Image (tube, helix red, strand yellow):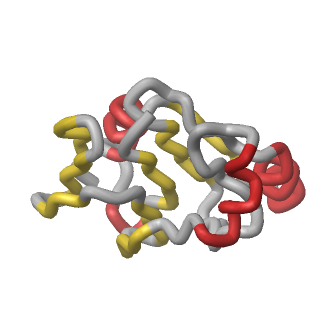
Amino acid sequence: MKAELVAFGELEIEGVRYHKDVVIEGGQIRKRDKGPSKALAGKARHTPLSAAEQIPWGGRRLIIGTGARGQLPIAREVGEEAERRGIAIEALPTIEACRLLADVERADVYAILHVTC
């Protein structure tokens, strides 16, 4: 799957531009709903990724793009749930996460990509 962080706050995935965080589940792209994690945002500048969100747990690997500078907080329970499910998490700056996606067939992509921080 071709994905690129083209600018701070802007992703391009398969030729389509996105200005919000996205979730990719089996190749299907949707906007990340941060609502369930908003309560945790008080301690961090950014809304952290928490297990209360609709995490795409369908694959063996979950790629998390942690933003332009790699600062997206990830709640501990996300890692615990991934471990319970036998899913490897690769959390790295979004530009690097996009590079990982290049080697994955669209239908096999399970990822969350943060476009700022």
Which residue is depicted at the point 25% across and 49% down?
11
Which residue is depicted at the point 22% across and 56% down?
13
Q: Looking at the picture, how far across and down is residue 70, in whole percent? A: 50, 28
- Comparing 89 with 105, the one in front is 89
Q: Is residue 36 visible?
A: yes
Q: Is residue 58 visible?
A: no
Which image quadrant is residue 46 in?
top right
The number of numbered discs placed on residues in the rendered structure image is 0
Q: Quadrant of the C terminus?
A: top left
In the image as oriented, which residue stretches furthest toward the left?
A: 15
Residue 23 relative to residue 39: left or right: left
- Comparing 109 with 98, the one in front is 98
Which residue is depicted at the point 77% across and 52% down?
78
Q: Looking at the picture, how far across and down is residue 47, in whole percent? A: 61, 51
Q: Quadrant of the N terminus?
A: bottom left
Q: Looking at the picture, how far across and down is residue 25, in whole percent? A: 48, 70
- Against 84, is 56 above or below? below
- Against 86, is 25 above or below? below
